[in-house]
Amino acid sequence: MPEHAAEVTAATIARLAGVGRAAVSNWRRRHADFPQPVGGTETSPSFALPEVEQWLRTQGKLAEVPLRERLWQQLSAHPAGAVTALVHVGCALLAVRDRPAKWRKLAALSDARLAEGLPGLLGEVLGERFGEADPARAVHSRPVNAPDAAELAPSLPLLRGVAELAAEAGAREAFEFLLGRHLDANPRQYTLTPQGPAGLMAALAGAAGSVLDPACGTGTLLCALPDAVALHGQDADPDLAALTGLRLALAGAAAIRTAAADSLRADAFGSLTADAVLCHPPFNERAWGHEELAYDPRWEYGLPARAESELAWVQHALARLREGGTAVLLMPPAAASRRSGRRIRADLLRRGALRAVVALPAGAAPPYGIPLHLWVLRRPDGATRPAPELLLVDTAGIEGVAVDGGRDRLPWPALQSAVLDAWTPFDRDGTTVEQPGVSRSVPVIELLDDDVDLAPARHLPPPAAEGGTAALDGVREHLGATLLRAAELTPPPPAPAQGARWSPTTVGELARAGALVLRAGGAGSGPDGPAVLTEHDVLAGTAPSGTLPEGPAEEPVLTRPGDVVVPVLGGGTVARVVDEASAGAALGRNLQLLRPEPAALDPWFLAGFLRGTANNRQASSYATTASRLDVRRLHLPRLPLAEQQRYGERFRALAEFEDALRLAGRLGEQLVQGLHDGLTDGSVGPE
């Protein structure tokens, strides 16, 4: 076994072979030549990846693993950790792109010679991109230094493979793919800013020569301003500062400076006067330095309370702007109304530093359960009179935006357009056209009361009941027709039958026999791709409504008529047959697609039996508080196609009845809420 071979667990082996973990346990017991553990614990051993792959290949159990997947397995199982491996990958990709001839010359050597020569090449490339490191001033040093030969040795197989992927897809795309997979696999370790709000924040900031993100994380906000001349990022986590620097360098940024330190306590850019500051600061931090920073000159608008760390970040952003520069911060909604911050909010208003507050819908960014705010600020120049009004925007009132959100369901192009339609004229001449329930420019004097509450929803006039009484009459008539349709579709009394004793099979066996194809959803190229059938759409029976998660360009899984789509999280008993109206949509995350061979399987028969409660319980496993469905373990009976079609027709009729009930429920809720709104705003009389 190679000295630095990657190690994998039984769960990873199961994924490599496309089986369950129980099968791996059986192989260990039954096959004396199965690789021996090389690490881990007695209950959770780890195995050398090369030995496992060789054994699976010899046994004919290893499917051809695409290069991307192989690289991800190597990175996730890296002995020094995935983040260290990502840093090595980013350095190597810079060398592959910027010094291709030198890389090819080194890559032709043995591993030992490559490990000896690579640090020098990486040091050359990193020095060109980030400047020379200064050990005496660590906070201002470049974000990553060239690893030495010993550090690189475990990464060499990964780096050779990454260079191959870069030749196919490009250096930046290769890095974004591996970084994206790591972030998706470890969602609780990082506070990420999705592409939707990042793009909106960049658009609100406008064109800028120099940009700062003082809590840069993985660099998403800085990547949203590709035309900026100079990008500055700082993060308390050295790993994130390194990944941000590498990400920006691979994106082609001209001038990059990133630093690893807490921006509030150890500001690396104290002399910077940026054109724009974008920031998604940490929320609700009490240990942000309230006592030690009490006399800091940045608190121009007042010393933030211990519970108001976000207002410390607001003032830090203003302190790093040039006069007239713009800052956009993603803020928790409580920062707009907590009493402890009212004096600072009041001073920001009086001096014209706070220009707009935009309420985003829930699901826009983590934490996804609450509707976050964007604060748009501008550093006063001392000569211009403070603005007399504040722009307030509530995006929950924009047509097509669901109040309950969902990161795969928000229409970001429409949302961004509506916000900019309100902001652009307000930024130009201080006024905007009022839209009830959506936007309004509010005189500052109206906001300077005892609370200084800046929550947009509290200051916007309510929208009129949509469509008035005529629209409500239409909803009522539609509801009546739907209820009649549901009554017609009500299933007849169930006929008793003796329990059938079928010969069972599983989805996994059918897939191996070629009777159906299994595909997992979630990959794709972001919001410009096709409409996405999301987990919510399947559960609610609605049309495709989402967008693919941002990341490297991959071919999405597109649905076809007759496909069966099953959610894999939550332990529900739901399966949806794709019709002509939903065909062509991309498959969203946490969904499994089953594509039956028409000559072997009826799709409605398949979907119906997959929905059995006992069937789902047998195929579900539990991790902490969530259950996950192993679709391959779902059972269904072996029946001739004609008999399948008899069952399929009954399952199709049940699906039509279920759709009618869903529609009636939605129409009933719409009618009730519309009458409540009409009665309370005066557009509907009590008669």
Image (cartoon, rainbow, N blue to C red):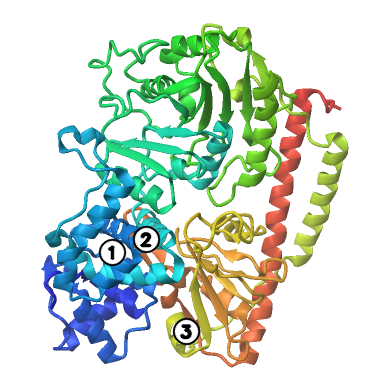
Labels 1 and 2: the sequence-earlier one: 1
Say what secondary structure mark 1 lies in: helix
Q: Residue at x 36, y 37 (%)?
A: 233
Inspect this view and state whether residue 397 appears. Answer: no
Q: Nearer the viewer, residue 427 or 563?
A: 427
Amino acid on which disc 1 is placed = Leu
Q: Residue at x 72, y 71 (%)?
A: 580
**Marks 3,2: beta carbons within 8 A:** no
Amino acid on which disc 2 is placed = Leu
Q: Nearer the viewer, residue 90 or 570?
A: 90
Q: Quadrant of residue 166?
A: bottom left
Labels 1 and 3: the sequence-earlier one: 1
Left/right of residue 532 with respect to residue 121 in the rendered view: right
Graded by Cα atoms within 10 Å as few (under 14), some (14 to 19) or many (20 or more), the crowding at tag 2 reads: many
Q: Quadrant of residue 630?
A: bottom left
Image x and y of residue 683, in percent? 83, 26
Q: Is residue 569 above or below residue 34?
A: above
The residue lying furthest to the front in this view is 101
The alpha-carbon separation of the residues under discs 1 and 3 comes to: 29 Å
Q: Can you identify the residue that label 1 sits on?
A: 75
Image x and y of residue 308, in percent? 37, 20
Task: Look at discs 3 and 2 and give the one toward the viewer.
Answer: 2
The alpha-carbon separation of the residues under discs 3 and 2 comes to: 29 Å
The alpha-carbon separation of the residues under discs 1 and 2 comes to: 8 Å
Q: Can you identify the residue that label 3 sits on?
A: 511
Task: Quadrant for the N terminus, please.
Answer: bottom left
Inspect this view and state whether residue 640 appears. Answer: yes
Q: Residue at x 58, y 55 (%)?
A: 547
Q: Which mark is residue 178?
A: 2
